[in-house]
Image (cartoon, helix red, strand yellow):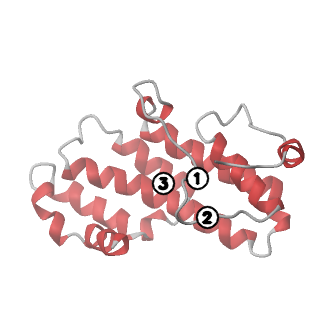
Amino acid sequence: EVVVRTRLQRDVGGYRPALPHSGDLDLWLRFAARCDIAFIEGADQAYYRIHSKNMTATRSPIVDLAQRAAAFESFFAECGSRLPCAQELRRRAQREIAKEALWRACRAYERRRWAETPIGALKQLANDTYPNSHRLPEYWGLYWRERVGPVVAPYLQVLMFSAVHRRLRQL
């Protein structure tokens, strides 16, 4: 169960209509900027119902990542002055969104879905969000996947640094 004081919900202003796909993220960021957030281990905190009409099932990866980027930008614009290292946190959020965009493009090559995945748009989103995206391991992983082509790329997955790096981080 999620418990938030009504006064806090009024103070932060509720959901923003401009962020329909990342409203929860935006709202929780604003809550966290004003008070402590707790996680109780071992107890169900919320239930998430999945069905065919979920926004997460019907939106594109571009919309998803662009909305997350917009939520972070909105949060830092409004609440950044409350955080001691807001610029560094903003940069990290931008970097992670760029990494995720590039990783999704990499995965399209590995899963043989390059034709239906907006790889160019994912690369552009990564660059727009984080101008140094060309320095990320995921950028170079995508670069090499594009160089060897979609037929060979799935077989080279184990040799790609970005894939190995990401798997090690998930352990």
Q: Which residue is mark 1?
A: 45
Please tell me which residue lies in front, 87 or 84.
Answer: 84
Q: Position of residue 164 (x, y in %)?
A: 26, 72
The answer to whether marks 1 and 2 mark residues whose Cβ atoms lie closer than 8 Å is yes
Alpha-carbon span between mark 1 and mark 2: 8 Å
Q: Secondary structure at mark 2?
A: loop
Q: Which residue is mark 2?
A: 40
Q: Which residue is mark 3?
A: 126
Which numbered mark, 1 or 3, is in the foreground of this view? 1
- Residue pictured at 62% horizontal, 67% vertical: 91
In primary-sequence order, the first of circles 1 and 3 is 1
Secondary structure, mark 1, is loop
Type of the residue with mark 3: Ala
In this view, the residue farthest toward the front is 43
Q: Residue at x 41, y 33 (%)?
A: 57
Q: Earlier in the sequence, mark 1 or mark 2?
A: 2
Q: Amino acid at mark 1?
A: Gln
